[in-house]
Image: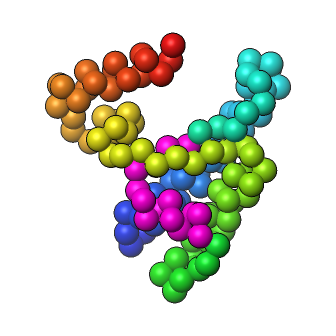
């Protein structure tokens, strides 16, 4: 249980980065992809600043293991971390109600990114 959405984002980013590391290694081993960092997109600027900062505060010191893992993956060039505005977050339709226009925009962006 977390006390804020920022904490939840940091914990989720750590969990996703672990999964990305495993999937990335498997895909590279199968020679389906050249070795390049995985991209992790986050819409929470506060979570990104916690991960990028090496300084712990009283509010964030319990997250040090999670953000240290993410920073380590970035340093060894296994992961790239990017901010994406909430309205451009393609995964939002998986967790929030989305209007038809937003859904169509997401489909178009996904198709463009996959080509």
Q: Quadrant of residue 44?
A: bottom left
Tag count? 0
Residue 15: x and y, percent?
Answer: 58, 51
Camera-side residue of 72 and 83: 83
The residue depicted at 63 percent of the width and 45 percent of the height is: 80
The segment highlighted magenta reads 40-53
Q: Is residue 23 visible?
A: yes
Colour scheme of the picture: rainbow
Residue 108: x and y, percent?
Answer: 34, 18
Q: Tell whether 10 sits left or right of 4.
A: right
The residue depicted at 54 percent of the width and 53 percent of the height is: 13
52 to 61, vertically: above or below: above
Q: Quadrant of residue 101?
A: top left
Q: Is residue 19 visible?
A: no
Q: Is residue 66 magenta?
A: no
Q: Is residue 41 magenta?
A: yes
Camera-side residue of 88 and 7: 88
Residue 46: x and y, percent?
Answer: 43, 65
The residue depicted at 43 percent of the width and 17 percent of the height is: 112
35 to 9, vertically: above or below: above
Q: Residue furthest top?
A: 115
Q: Tell whether 98 sits left or right of 24.
A: left
Q: Quadrant of residue 103?
A: top left
Residue 19: x and y, percent?
Answer: 64, 42
| Quarter of the image that includes the N terminus | bottom left
The residue depicted at 74 percent of the width and 18 percent of the height is: 32
Q: Tell whether 77 sits left or right of 53.
A: right
Q: Residue furthest bottom?
A: 58
């Amino acid at each position: 249980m977390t006390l804020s959405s920022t904490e939840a984002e940091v914990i989720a980013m750590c969990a996703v980065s672990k999964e990305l590391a495993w999937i990335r290694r498997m895909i590279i081993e199968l020679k389906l992809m050249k070795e390049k960092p995985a991209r992790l997109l986050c819409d929470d600027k506060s979570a990104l600043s916690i991960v990028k900062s090496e300084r712990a505060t009283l509010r964030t010191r319990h997250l040090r293991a999670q953000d240290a893992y993410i920073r380590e993956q970035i340093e060894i060039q296994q992961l790239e971390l990017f901010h994406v505005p909430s309205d451009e977050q393609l995964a939002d339709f998986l967790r929030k109600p989305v209007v038809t226009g937003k859904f169509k925009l997401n489909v178009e962006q996904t198709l463009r990114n996959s080509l």
